[in-house]
Image (spheres, rainbow, N blue to C red):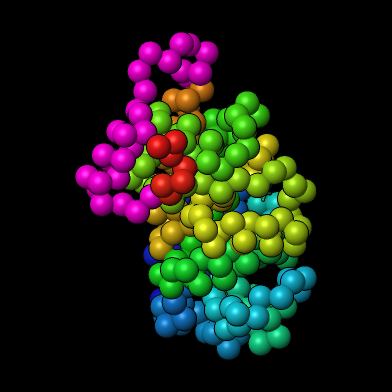
């Protein structure tokens, strides 16, 4: 059996959480990540018959029965994952009842998966239904993105449009736009259901006055989506108090979409 601390999926979580922490996106226990793993790959590192303990998830994830995920722990700090992955991360498998998780590795101090597990697993179900390649759900509190939700209308079209307009890359990176949820209590099944519903349509979902969700086929893709939104939010806020002399126009946005051959939300433009 290979050493789990060398597994690319553990190394990837260590590197990504460290990056996100250093960018100032994930203060204290802020943020959480889940990645769906390949069973055969995990079996190179762990005995899949060895269940350390059972964890009650408190919601139904039946479409994911048997699926294995690496998930950040509740109350754990992204800052600390790199130094102690076995305590701050866990590998769980959705058990045959759909409401219990088998702990296969990690959460070594008796911990549990992130409090946002409902939003994560329900979002995995949504994304897999529209893109079978999806593996990652990522939640974070990037500063400028969060700040923007205090001063910008929480309308999906207007929010997306404002960001598309300040950064040429945005139309290419998230042509499908950004879903926006109003402020809600976090950590609940309700916000999980609402997030998952948006995830059927969007790869990015804003939690107003809280943070953002992104997804993708790997950690880089989910991270890159959030990173691009955050960059655009910074540019928007840096320029918001000055008269806008230049901007990327709607015809320009159409040109970008054509040049990069991306399908975009045409109803998010004002043409
Ligand atoms: O895990 O970010 O939304 C801490 C949070 C809750
Ligand atoms: Zn959060």
Which residues lie in the magenta part?
238-264
Percent of width and height locating residue 100: 71, 78
Front in this rendered view, residue 213 or 71? 213
Report the side of 141 relative to 74 (left or right): left
Residue at x 30% of width, y 33% of height:
252
Percent of width and height locating residue 217: 41, 63
Q: Which residue lies most toward the left here?
A: 259
Residue at x 42% of width, y 83% of height:
40
Quadrant placement of the N terminus: bottom left
Q: Is residue 241 above or below residue 207?
A: above
Front in this rendered view, residue 85 or 247? 247
- Is residue 262 shown in magenta? yes
Front in this rendered view, residue 87 or 180? 180
Percent of width and height locating residue 72: 60, 58
Percent of width and height locating residue 136: 49, 61
Q: Is residue 238 above or below residue 154?
A: above
Residue at x 48% of width, y 32% of height:
162
Report the side of 119 relative to 177 (left or right): right
């Amino acid at each position: 059996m290979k050493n789990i601390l060398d597994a690319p999926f553990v190394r990837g979580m260590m590197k990504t959480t460290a990056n996100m922490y250093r960018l100032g996106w994930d203060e204290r226990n802020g943020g959480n990540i889940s990645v769906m793993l390949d069973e055969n790959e995990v079996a190179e590192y762990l005995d899949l018959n060895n269940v350390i303990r059972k964890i009650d998830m408190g919601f139904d994830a039946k479409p994911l029965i048997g699926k294995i995920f690496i998930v950040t722990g509740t109350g754990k700090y992204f800052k600390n994952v790199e130094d102690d992955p076995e305590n701050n991360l866990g590998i769980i498998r959705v058990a045959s009842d759909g409401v219990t998780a088998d702990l296969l590795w990690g959460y070594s101090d008796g911990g549990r998966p992130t409090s946002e597990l409902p939003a994560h697993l329900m979002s995995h179900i949504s994304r897999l239904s529209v893109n079978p390649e999806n593996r990652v759900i990522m939640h974070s509190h990037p500063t400028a993105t969060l700040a923007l939700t205090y001063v910008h209308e929480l309308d999906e079209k207007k929010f997306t449009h404002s960001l598309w307009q300040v950064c040429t890359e945005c139309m290419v990176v998230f042509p499908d736009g950004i879903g926006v949820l109003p402020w809600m209590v976090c950590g609940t099944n309700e916000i999980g259901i609402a997030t998952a519903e948006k995830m059927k349509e969007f790869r990015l979902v804003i939690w107003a006055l809280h943070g953002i969700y992104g997804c993708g086929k790997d950690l880089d893709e989910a991270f890159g989506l959030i990173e691009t939104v955050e960059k655009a939010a910074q540019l928007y806020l840096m320029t918001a108090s000055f008269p806008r002399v230049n901007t990327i126009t709607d015809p320009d946005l159409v040109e970008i979409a054509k040049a990069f051959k991306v399908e975009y939300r045409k109803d998010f433009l004002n043409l």
